[in-house]
Image: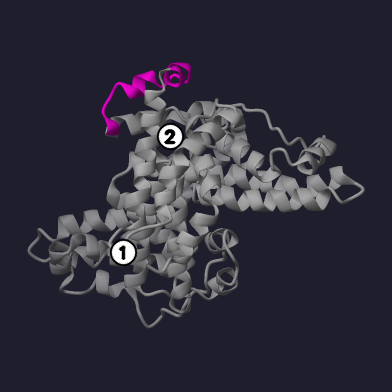
Amino acid sequence: MQQTNGQNYLEENLKAVTNIMVAQFLQKLTYEEVQIIVQELLDLAEKCKSLKSHELPSESCHQLMTTFLEHICNNEGMADKRVFSDCCNINKTARHKCFLLHKKDDAGYSEIFQISNPEQICEMDKENQVPVKDQYIYETSRKHPFVYGPSILTMSVCYETAVQSCCQEENKTECFQTKLEPIRKYVREISLRHHHLCEIGIKFNHRVATAVELVLLTKKQPKANFSEIAKLSMDIKNLHQICCEGNAVVCVLGRSQLMDYICSKQAILSSKFTPCCEMPEPFRGECIINSENDDKPDLSSLPLRRFTEDQSVCKQFTDKQDFFLQRFLYEYSRRHPELAVPVILRVDTVYQSLLGKCCKLENPLECYSHGEGIFQRVVRESHERVKNQCDLREKLGDSNFHDRYASKILSRLCLLVFVNFCC
């Protein structure tokens, strides 16, 4: 069987990826303890590299997570020492969720690579007893257990390159400050984003999670056709679920395969992907994810009237509700890239509610023909609500505002992570 680029990339980085998985679950283990477990898991991980023609990569790689958790539970000393004994006493499905709940984001672990002490960093790199890249993967994984494996791999290469470069400079401190701080900032930001993406999958239903991806993809690729956006929305939603479950091996393979597909379709997806697709792994994926939104197409000849003035709206809504609402979400999003994701989702919810009411009436068209005006009102009210909150935040200050409104905004926090309305 001919290997895909994703399988080749996984093969080259299998040990590093397994390190990420172990360190993210067992955050209190030392580097040496992590390496022992990694070596014991690698034999099974090797199966991800040599698949039979009828197997999907994930079928073999998924076994790695089950074996990993069983390994922890069968090692009684480790389970007791690492407070996982409660997880080990329940069935396998619940066990996995239990282990995930024990993850602590940015759990106060000290930063081993202090910019203020560049000589120590360079000495470690020079001695090469533990490669700087490997040490960085370990430290970053335990400090940020929700960051997806592919992102950690990318940043580890950036970190290693920066260290090797700065250690040749006379003013090492200034060099490290310039090159390492942006890496740390990016990791903190992507950790927050990945954590919230995982929260969306937990707190909201399948349709909401898919809708979020559909809006984000449409805003980034407004020229792409609906069928491609719908397919990618589902694929990415499923990939988020895999990565959030902590199986770094499947996450890395899935991300690489997804980028293979995107690059094979770049001509119909986005003109902004071309320079990214020319990059090697691991930079290709991060580049595509962080690329600019494509230019908005001219949609003046394709108004939204088909959703508010067409006689067949109720039939389409009744026959294929999810498909019809996804199509509306796609068409509305590509016409309004300036709107935040929660606002667009709110419009979608209002439209669904409107059709649910109107399609029961004798003359539904007369009812839903007012949709465009209702959409505009939703947008206006959303902007006014956010402006009021931002004004209040400025008046109270960050601390008081957070204390007063934390409980009210908590349920919406997952969706608001994608936007910066005005604050």
Position of residue 411 in the picture relative to residue 280 (left or right): left
Q: Which residues are magenta?
A: 77-92
Image x and y of residue 408, in percent = 42, 32
Q: Residue furthest right?
A: 170
Q: Earlier in the sequence, mark 1 or mark 2?
A: 1
Q: What separation in Å lies between label 1 and label 2 (alpha carbons)?
A: 47 Å
Image x and y of residue 14, in percent = 51, 49
Q: What's the mark number on residue 53?
A: 1
Q: Nearer the viewer, residue 297 or 260?
A: 260
Answer above or below: position of 115 versus 270: above
Say what secondary structure mark 2 lies in.
Answer: helix
Dot 1, how many residues are within 10 Å of its Cα: few (below 14), some (14-19), or many (20+)?
few
Image x and y of residue 186, in percent = 63, 48
Identify the colour scheme used.
one colour
- The quadrant in which the N terminus is found is bottom left
Dot 2, how many residues are within 10 Å of its Cα: few (below 14), some (14-19), or many (20+)?
few
Image x and y of residue 358, in percent = 16, 59
Label 1 amino acid?
A: Ser
Q: What's the mark number on residue 246?
A: none
Q: Is residue 85 magenta?
A: yes
Q: Residue furthest left?
A: 362
Q: Quadrant of residue 120?
A: top right
Label 2 amino acid?
A: Leu
Q: Residue at x 36, y 70 (%)?
A: 228
Please name the residue that numbered disc 2 is placed on: 410
Answer above or below: position of 196 versus 298: above
Q: Residue at x 69, y 32 (%)?
A: 111
Say what secondary structure mark 1 lies in.
Answer: loop
Q: Nearer the viewer, residue 353 or 168?
A: 168
